[in-house]
Image: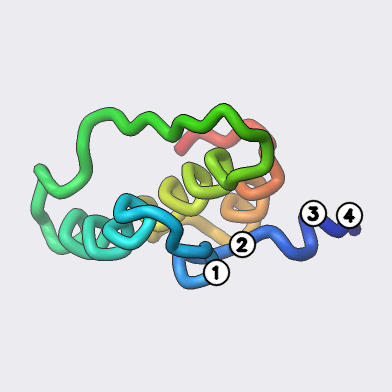
Amino acid sequence: MDLYNKYRPKDFSDLFPTSPIIQALPTLVNRALNGDDDAIPKAMLFYSEEYGTGKTTTARILAIALNPNLSEAEKEMIMSGQDVPV
């Protein structure tokens, strides 16, 4: 296994909370799962000019968190970057 996959964050608690957006995501996900349709914006843009800042990993964790009925195999496919209909 590659080191970047071995140590890639798997949950919001594994992310380093460098911005208010990262800190707010778990609360927004909980509100969305409890029926608040306006908790998560219709579109989110993770932007940074730097490589390796966690943009894609954060989006993948968000996709998994918003779809609690995913199987472990589907979660692994999302985290590994394979195409999964979410």
CA distance for labels 4 and 3: 6 Å
CA distance for labels 2 and 1: 5 Å
Q: Which residue is mark 2?
A: 9
Q: Earlier in the sequence, mark 4 or mark 1?
A: 4
The answer to whether the residues at label 4 and label 3 have Cβ atoms under 8 Å apart is: yes
Q: Amino acid at mark 2?
A: Pro
- Tell me the element at label 1: helix
Q: Earlier in the sequence, mark 2 or mark 1?
A: 2
Foreground pick, 67 / 60: 60
Q: Earlier in the sequence, mark 3 or mark 1?
A: 3
- Marker disc for residue 14: 1
Q: Amino acid at mark 3?
A: Tyr
Foreground pick, 26 / 48: 48
Q: Give the residue at x 33% y 33%.
A: 44
Residue 50 location in percent, x, y? Answer: 62, 33
Up/down of 13 relative to 60, above or below? below
Q: Which residue is mark 3?
A: 4
* Side (left or right) of 36 relative to 16: left
- Marker disc for residue 2: 4
Q: Amino acid at mark 4?
A: Asp
- Marker disc for residue 52: none
Q: Earlier in the sequence, mark 4 or mark 2?
A: 4
CA distance for labels 4 and 1: 18 Å
Q: Earlier in the sequence, mark 3 or mark 2?
A: 3
- Tell me the element at label 4: loop
The 10 Å Cα crowd at callout 1, few under 14, some 14 to 19, many 20 or more, is few
